[in-house]
Image (cartoon, rainbow, N blue to C red):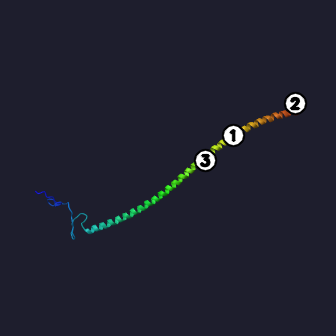
Amino acid sequence: MGGFNAKNYTEQGGGKTVIGGTLEFTEGAEVIGMPGGGDTGDLADRVGSLEETVGGLEETVNGLGETVSGLGETVSGLEETVSGLEETVSGLGETVSGLEETANSLEESVDGLEETLNSLDETIDSLQETVTELEEQISVLADGNEEEF
C-alpha cells in the first residue's frame, strides 16, 4: 500500500470519526444530536452571557483596584502616625532620662541635708552641754563659791 495518511477519517464500521484538520461549517449547515446542542443561536446566547460575565468581572477588578488604592492611602496615613508615635516615644524617653537625672540630684541634695542636720544635732548637743556647764558655774558664782572653778 501506498502510505497515504488522512487527517480526517472515519474508522472502519463508522463508529468513530477523527477530525485532525479543520472542520468548516458553511452557511445553512446543521449539526444534529451534538451534546450540549448544536444550535448556533444557543452559542450566541452563551457568548453574550460570557461577555456579561467578563464585563462584571472587569467592574469587580476596577473596584478592587480602587480599594487597593484606598488601602495604600490608609497605609501611608498609618505609617505617618507610627512615625509620629515613634518621635513622641523618643521625646518621652528623653523626658524620663531628664527626670531620672533630677531625681538623682535631689537624692544627693537630701543626703547632703541629712549630713547637715546630723552636724547641727551634734552642735546643739555640744552647745547644750556648754550651757549646762555655764549654768553650773553661774550657780556656783551665785552661791559665792568661787573656789570650785
Query: Which circle marks residue 84 in the picture?
Result: none
Find disc 3 in the rendering and name its residue: 98
> Disc 2 designates what residue?
146
Residue extending furthest right? Answer: 144
Q: Residue at x 27, y 67 (%)?
A: 43
**Label 2 secondary element:** helix
Name the element at disc 3.
helix
Q: Earlier in the sequence, mark 2 or mark 3?
A: 3
Q: Position of residue 91 (x, y in %)?
A: 57, 51
> Could you tell me residue 73's position as x and y percent?
47, 59
Q: Residue furthest top?
A: 147
Q: CA distance from mark 2 to mark 3?
A: 66 Å
Q: Quadrant of the C terminus?
A: top right
- Residue at 39% across / 64% down in the picture? 59
| Mark 2 residue type | Glu
Q: Which element type, helix, strand or loop, lies under badge 1?
A: helix
Q: How many marks?
A: 3
Q: What residue is drawn where x is 41% and y is 63%?
A: 63
Q: Residue furthest left?
A: 1
Quarter of the image for residue 56 reads bottom left
Front residue (pair 52, 61): 61
**Mark 2 to mark 1 CA distance (whole Å):** 43 Å
Q: Which residue is mark 1?
A: 114
User: The residue under label 3 is which amino acid type?
Assistant: Gly
* Left-right relation of 92 to 31: right
